[in-house]
Amino acid sequence: MSQAELTAPSAPRTPRHALWSLGILRSELATMLRRWRTVALLGVLAAVPVLIGIAVRIETGDGPQGGSGGGGGGPAFFSQVTNNGLFLVFAALSATLPVFLPMAVGVIAGDSVAGEAGGGTLRYLLVAPAGRTRLLLAKYASVLVFCLLATLVVAASALATGALLFPVGEVTTISGTRIGFGEGLLRAGLIALVAAVSLAGFAALGLFVSTLTGSGIAAMAATVGVLVTVQILDTMPQLHAIHPYLFPHYWLSFTDLLREPVYGDEMVRNLGLQALYAAVFGSAAWARFTTKDITV
């Protein structure tokens, strides 16, 4: 080999680990979206706003009801649906976020690792050079994608149903001011995004539970059981001291996006709490998964 060849700069190497990580993530997403369970969960979530819209339409008849002032979050949005179909997005997210959305996320997250272990495919996934850490990150990323997809399905279904069954136009905020339909639509998108991010901490908890067992059904049941238990604790006034530390406590803080001006203190607390849960249970899942003995 000549001296020129020895001193010539070498060509940049392909980041193989990054390519492996992207490949695993694509594979995880494709596998998740092809499962009948995922399709069924998204179908149920899409049906909820339709049922809410039909029920409100039947209850109110043809005449719009409800005052022009906004009311608070949750059920208070229902009084505004007949005046503006865009409020069905806010009402549907308020109705599904406490129960339906996190239960769907719990099923996907709980099955993410345990389902592979129970099906005997986990050990074959670990043969890939990407390693356990990248595999776990890819699984968590796929669960986060499901959080966003599920929330957008609810919002899109509610928007379509609201536009078909009710008039749409300017939006009256909780503060009593009016904003244009375009700005209201933008805020609806932001609310859906905040709702999706609100599930990040619970998704990490479900991933951790999934690393503790080799049964997907057991992991899903345990994750949903934790959700129900924490939701009950969050409603008990005797435990008000711990409420700000429970992951679902600030889930409905997205209603502050319908204030004028926007009041974001509780949303910031919610995002910080979700980041804390994601860090704690994500680390616990990594510690468990990287030391777990995979025998099947």
Image (cartoon, rainbow, N blue to C red):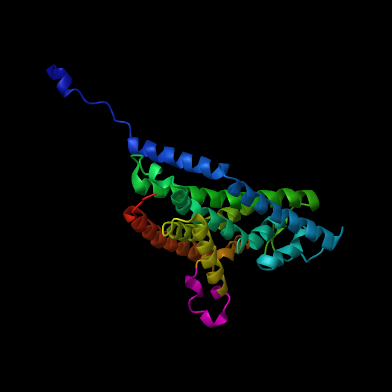
The vertical placement of 252 against 7, above or below, is below
Q: Position of residue 249 (x, y in %)?
A: 54, 69
Q: Position of residue 71 (x, y in %)?
A: 70, 68
Query: Quarter of the image holding residue 129?
Result: top left
The vertical placement of 16 against 28, above or below, is above
Query: Quarter of the image holding residue 237?
Result: bottom right
Res. 237 in view: yes
Outermost residue to the top: 2
| 251 and 135: which is toward the camera | 135
Outermost residue to the left: 3
Outermost residue to the front: 296
User: Residue placed at 53% from the left, 62% from the top?
Assistant: 221
Query: Quarter of the image holding residue 100?
Result: bottom right
Res. 183 in view: no
Quadrant containing the N terminus is: top left
Question: How many numbered markers are drawn?
Answer: 0
Part of the protein shown in magenta: 233-246
Magenta-colored stretch includes residue 241: yes
| 32 and 168: which is toward the camera | 32
| 248 and 45: which is toward the camera | 45
Left/right placement of residue 143 relative to residue 77 reads: left
Outermost residue to the right: 62
User: Residue placed at 57% from the left, 79% from the top?
Assistant: 236
Left/right placement of residue 181 relative to residue 106 reads: right
The vertical placement of 177 against 241, above or below, is above
Left/right placement of residue 202 relative to residue 94 reads: left
Q: Position of residue 264 (x, y in %)?
A: 54, 63
Magenta-colored stretch includes residue 112: no
Q: Position of residue 45 (x, y in %)?
A: 65, 53
